[in-house]
Image (tube, coloured by chain):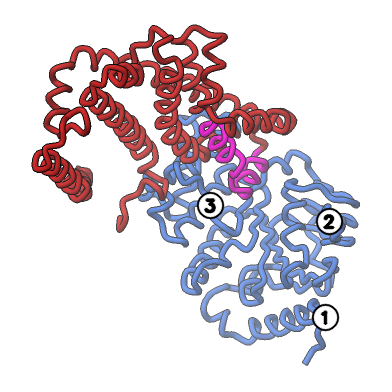
Amino acid sequence: MSASRLNWREMLTAAAPPLAAFMAFLALWEAVVRLRGIPPYMLPAPSIILQKLIEDRELLFSSLLVTLSITLRALALATVCGALLALAMAQSKWLARTLTPYAIMLQVTPIVAIAPLLLVYLSPPRAVLVCAFLVAFFPILSNTALGLASVDHALLDLFDLYHASAWRRLIYLRAPAALPQFLAGLRIAGGLALIGAVVAELAAGAAGQGTGLAFRIVEAGFRLDIPRMFAALALLSLTGVAIYGALSMLTYYSLRRWHESARERGA
Amino acid sequence: MTPPARGAPLVSLRGVAKSFDGGLEVLRALDLDVYPGETVTLLGPSGCGKSTALRLLAGLTRPTRGEILWADPARRERLGFVFQDATLLPWLDVFANVYLPLRLAGVSRAPAAPRVEEALELVGLSGFRDALPRELSGGMKMRCAIARALVTRPALLLMDEPFAALDEVTRIKLNNELLALKARLDTTIVFVTHSVGESVYLSTRIVVLAANGGEIVDQIPVDPGMTRDGEYRLGPVFSQLSRRASNALRRAMGEDEP
């Protein structure tokens, strides 16, 4: 118990310097805008952006929910498909050799270039979902596959010695051994899913009946409502941070008992 | 040169050869009988194939030529193997690590528990059943690995340089514990090492293998009735056997005797 409380204090201590730097940055921004008398349509002060966030809260938060829901659904889909395909590829070298080039091709093709094409074939909401899924899928697949493939040979020998079935080998050895890499992939995928959703929304633009945050940015741009652009951007950025934070917590609590990456130093 | 015959051998290697994919022939034609109750040490320089011989006995790899004969094929399934590293699963506590072989055999937790507790008691880890491997010292990790190997009550315990990575004090301590375990369980052990002292201290027979091809250079019987303790380590029998083993080892490396 005391260890976890100590940990919270450590986390606060760790968070203080970047938070202070962020506050200082906002104060400087505010001061420059006010002293120079820069108009809000050029560069809005943080106070104006905050005011806009409160004023347009209904519109912005409903858009946030749209973007967040697409991101999370894409992430969930990518997690299930990525992990399952990695498991299948770990069981069959033939399958792995066949599919790997395509997985890489999907990954290296810029998603911005795929989005308009998806919009031709799919309805805008579905296209956005597929786009977010495609970018989130690969890091989960490649990280999980790497984790499953890099199990200690001595441990595999141990399981051979006891004639472990493929299934028991998977659930008692390969899956837990691959968990750290899988979680690392998931953390990358969380951020990428948001990027994929935003890119697709931007590509859909006014053509789609999109109501996500990215669409709000485009829309506010057309209306030269610069403070609202910033407000929507701030929400997107906070969403990204929140997703990353949540996945980091998940990683920490899943691995803290045994894995080096999640252990407190000096413990 | 011949070992004291005690009935039929538990397992025999007959002209066993092993080459790896690169064409490297680690063992050329090894003949070796292991009798019940023996502690056979395979002693030799690096690359003499002693670990390969152990893996062949364990069925972890197949011979390129020759055969491995078990007096009772059922016994071949009852093996314990202790690797050079403890090879514990880091996400499982000590109890679950020792339980693993039974779990893999489909024994559920409740009926397995007494056997796991017994194995932990044998190696003196009863108080550490909930500890994770990272919380254990090197010696304790190795004890846990030994408990895991013993939990299936193996007919043959195979040990591949299990104490090589430990400090001298821990090593001597674990050597004594192994002798005590052996006396209590009356199991058969094949032990791989490159330490002359360890081989003389632990075994009832030392088999010295040559560097290239694993030809047997010498077989040194050690009186199993001898008390193995600190006195034995300093006594004349020990030094005489050590000298013979060292000379054989020198021949195994292709050097001349002094």
Tell me which label, 1 or 2, sits earlier in the chain.
2
For the residue marked with disc 3, what is the amino acid?
Ala
For the colour red, the matching chain is: A
Q: Is residue A156 magenta?
A: yes
Q: Is the residue at mark 2 from the same chain as the one at mark 3?
A: yes
Q: Kindly identify which residue carries mark 3.
A: B145
For the residue marked with disc 2, what is the amino acid?
Gly
Please identify the dominant SS of the magenta region: helix
Choose top left, top right, bottom left or bottom right for residue B7: bottom right
Is A220 left or right of B240, judged from the image as shown? left
Residue A70: % across, % down? 40, 17
Q: Is residue A20 visible?
A: yes
Picture disc at residue B214 = none
Magenta highlight range: A138-162
Q: Is residue B102 visible?
A: no
For the residue marked with disc 1, what is the amino acid?
Gly
Q: Kindly identify which residue carries mark 1.
A: B254
The residue shown at (28%, 19%) is A220
Q: Is the residue at mark 1 from the same chain as the one at mark 2?
A: yes
For the colour blue, the matching chain is: B
The residue shown at (30%, 31%) is A237
Is A173 left or right of A31, judged from the image as shown? right
Picture disc at residue B22 = 2
Residue A219: % across, % down? 31, 16
Kindly identify which chain the residue marked by label 1 belongs to. B
Residue mark closest to the camera, 1 vs 2: 2
Tell me which label, 1 or 3, sits earlier in the chain.
3
The residue shown at (41%, 56%) is B136
